[in-house]
Image (spheres, helix red, strand yellow):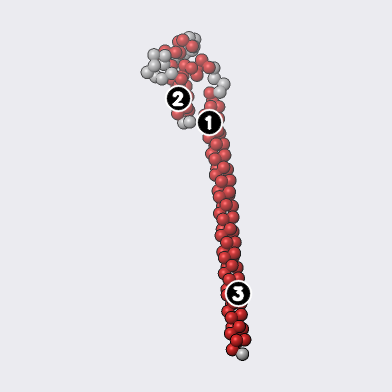
Amino acid sequence: MRRNAAIEQERRIKENELQTDLLVQTKQRELHERELEGEIALEKQRAALTDQKTENERKEADAKAYALKAVLAPVQGLDWRLLMMLNAHPTDARSPKNRRAQYFPGLAPDLTVAHALLRAAFTLV
């Protein structure tokens, strides 16, 4: 009878150990699943952030293109000689005052206002 009781007690101990091992494995699997869910959520957030950054960069590029078009629109139809004349630095020997006679000998000498407006427009970019 003692032997049977010892065998029965040994069997219960082994069953408890097996149940404990099973419980530990279940908890480890649940923990691993949570970690994977967290990684998936993080990757989704990263993808959303990348999409948002791309959209913001596109909008910024569109805004810069619009601003550049707005600045260049007034000078688009100008004669290239006028642009060359207005492009010179004021201290240059070929400054607008000196170039007026070269490119537009028949024009009035008062192109200073146009030069100042174009110079201001190009410095906005």
93 up-or-down from 6: above or below: above
65 up-or-down from 55: above or below: above
Say which residue appears at 45% left-offset and 25% top-offset: 119
Question: Is any atom of residue 117 visible in this view?
Answer: no
Dot 1 alpha-carbon crowd within 10 angstroms: few under 14, some 14 to 19, many 20 or more: some
Residue bearing the label numbered 3: 19
User: Going from the N terminus, do you reach mark 1 or mark 2 first?
Assistant: 1
Residue 57 location (% of width, % of height)? 54, 40
Which of the 4 image quadrants contains residue 14?
Answer: bottom right
Q: Secondary structure at mark 3?
A: helix
Report the amino acid beneath label 3. Gln
Residue 60 location (% of width, % of height)? 54, 39
Say which residue appears at 49% left-offset and 11% top-offset: 104
Distance Cα–Cα, label 1 vs label 3: 73 Å
Report the amino acid beneath label 2. Arg
Question: Is any atom of residue 85 visible in this view?
Answer: yes
Residue bearing the label numbered 1: 68
Report the amino acid beneath label 1. Leu
Say which residue appears at 46% left-offset and 19% top-offset: 86
Residue 119's disc is: 2
User: Going from the N terminus, do you reach mark 2 or mark 3 first?
Assistant: 3
Closer to us: 40 or 19:
19
User: Going from the N terminus, do you reach mark 1 or mark 3 first?
Assistant: 3
Which one is closest to the eye, mark 1 or mark 2?
1
Q: Secondary structure at mark 2?
A: helix
Dot 3 alpha-carbon crowd within 10 angstroms: few under 14, some 14 to 19, many 20 or more: few
Q: Are marks 1 and 3 in contact (CB under 8 Å)?
A: no
Closer to us: 73 or 23:
23
